Amino acid sequence: MDLAYTPEQQDFRAEVRAWMEANVPKEPLVTLEREDGYHQHVEWERKLASGNWGMVTWPEAYGGRGLDLIQWLIFEEEYYRAGAPLRVNQNGIFLLGPTVMEFGTDEQKARFLTPMAKGEVIWAQAWSEPNAGSDMAAITSKAIRDGDHYVISGQKTWSSRASFADWGFGLFRTDPESKRHKGLSFILFDLNAPGVTRRPIRQLHGDPGFAELFFDEVRVPVANRIAGEGEGWNVAMATAGFERGLMLRSPARFQATAERLVKLFRQHEAKAAPAAREQVMQAWMDAQAYAYNTYAVASKIMAGGHIGAEASLNKIFWSELDRAAHRTAMQILGASAELRHLNGGALNAWLEGYIFSLSGPIYAGSNEIQRNIIAERLLGLPR
Amino acid sequence: MDFSITEDQATLTQGVRDYLAGVHTPEVLRALDASDSRRSPDVWQGLVEMGLPGLLVPDAEGGLGLSLLDAVLIAAEFGRAGVAEPLADTALVAAPLLAKAGGQEALLAAMAAGEAKVALQHPVNPWVADLDGASHILSVEDGALLLAERSGGAELIDSVDPLRRLYAPVAAAGTAVGSADALLDHAALIAAAQLVGVADAMLEQATDYAKNRSQFGQPIGSFQAVKHHLATAVVKIEFAKPVIQRAAIALQENAASAPVHVSHAKLAAADAAWAMSETAIQAHGAMGYTYEVDLHFWMKRAWALAGAWGDRAFHLARIDAAVIGGALPIGPGHSFA
């Protein structure tokens, strides 16, 4: 164990910091859950890509920099330190990207990864269906083979980014006679293809962050299938592993929240409830613990190890610390917490953040599902 | 930057775990509990033969010269096995402090050989553990750490932990070997490390019980309510471990921020162990409320260690001064400040 950064790592940090300071928008963007904000965020993705910062851990051949996970953590720290915008393409770069890298053909890698890293194609996820949420094996949307195409019919829902994104990915039943985990395939589709209808869904905050998708005999080339026909479940499980595992929520995000919370508490110290003081300290401690753990996991992966069911521990920890930190802020704000804008016009970021934090324990596999995974796979309790 | 333990460290830790699982069984704990002294020369001799008292004693004095990172990994194994002998205080707290102080070669050699034991007296605790069996005592006066041969003073104080032997403090005396704060930080770190081992032991017992106890025609561990209690405890335990390792490195390197990280470690470990203790008794149901099930040894150790070497208020105050007070840089990019 050596908890000092090398001179090369320090140089890299300085390089990221300089670029972020020169390029991060001075004014916060409009929320990416709204059409105008979505386009602002896409523009930011393209700016990042112009600096070759789209996805630093990816191979150079696909628009990355071929960096290791410690460098990725440093990049993320500088990204959040600079207050840079949320990643509108996170479904692509953090979930689909690693999946294509692991399961895709060379042709698929060239076709999908480079435009993803460059922010040219923005991706939506399409896992859930009205009757298949936590129980994803209950999926009924079908993709029926017709020559070198699939014909997709059915419905997806709660699809993040699908109101405005370009492409989507999800699981479809390619064997109509199959049940549960079998007979599913992982398929990528153009959201603008004939037969796809999007119905934006207003989220808790009032903006259409996700959408319902209706498929009416949508023709999708077989070449858009990742891995073999009927192997979709295993591919999706790997994708879900990326989602709740290392990449989706880097510790820097929560360290930034904890830092803001400490500052908020200092401003309101005189009137804050006694318990708030301890909750603020807990937020800092938990964000730090999450950072240490992430550095430990990154070190393990770099040494050839991998992350399995332990990913469920991460997902519970970050989602619940995020909710607690924002709840603390809401309680410190007291009667001002409900206001949409604070300080003469600025968006009440604590309110927005609290609303978003409520989704953390639900998406990427609800925390109840994660607790089942921990109990059954880590502790070996019976199903 | 590399946040991982080496293969050697993992092997050594596993070796200690396997050894203690063989010689320091729950039967041993029950036998000690039934004895007057709650201590056993045979058990101590077994620990000496494994070389455990010398782990942090320098090579030149017959030890292994290991680091504080090794110490926290080993301390967790002491906690897991419920070790009652005064091994952690002498081997993992006093040894590195005396090695750093210098000039204590003879004592360190005797400690490595298992012939000398050092009791730790600090004003943060209203008691001294294992004073009667100690050959030496570290105590505090005016912020200085003093070393002396132990003499007299053996007024026993009752602890709920049947295997703890607590005594009233004695008058401080001796030669200066460091600072009171150094003793507190080392001892709090080792207490934190033992606490996660204690928690892991309770988790294992509760999980085994949940697998084997049937109600309504099935193992109670198949019920989601039981699963989720245990899973929640696992999250707390696993996220305390890297905090302890990070604190060990900070203290080993004499980082100015080390006390903050030790306090974080102590709070995280105590919270995890305390939560695990309540989860474990709940999983055991009425069996857990008996003295016949071994769980109580670890549960009581968790309560004891949680309050020892700085309680919640003490460690929160140090976090408060650093984080809210602004002495420590925080936020992204300050993961290792």
Image: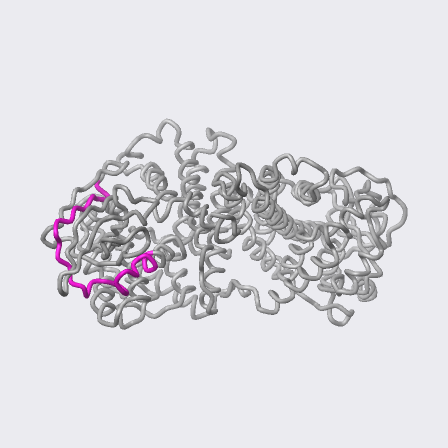
Can residue B324 be seen in the rendering of this structure? no
Quadrant including the N terminus of chain A: bottom right
Can residue B336 be seen in the rendering of this structure? yes
Count of all numbered marks drawn on residues in the image: 0
**Relative horizontal placement of residue B148, taking residue B66 as reference (left or right):** right
Q: Residue furthest right?
A: B152
- List x then y, in percent, for residue B197: 63, 52
**Relative horizontal placement of residue A244, taking residue B60 as reference (left or right):** left
- List x then y, in percent, for residue A157: 24, 44
Q: Does A210 lie within the magenta span?
A: yes
Front residue (pair A351, A302): A302
What's the residue at 56%, 53% (across, down)?
B241
What's the residue at 66%, 64% (across, down)?
B15
- List x then y, in percent, for residue A47: 23, 60
Front residue (pair B122, B111): B111
**Relative horizontal placement of residue B47, taking residue A202 as reference (left or right):** right
Q: Does B39 lie within the magenta span?
A: no
- List x then y, in percent, for residue B214: 57, 41
Front residue (pair A99, A276): A99
Front residue (pair B106, A219): A219
The colour scheme of the drawn protein is one colour
Q: Residue furthest top?
A: A335
Residue A109 falls in image quadrant: bottom left
Name above or below for residue A332 compared with residue B166: above
Give the magenta part as a residue range: A208-236
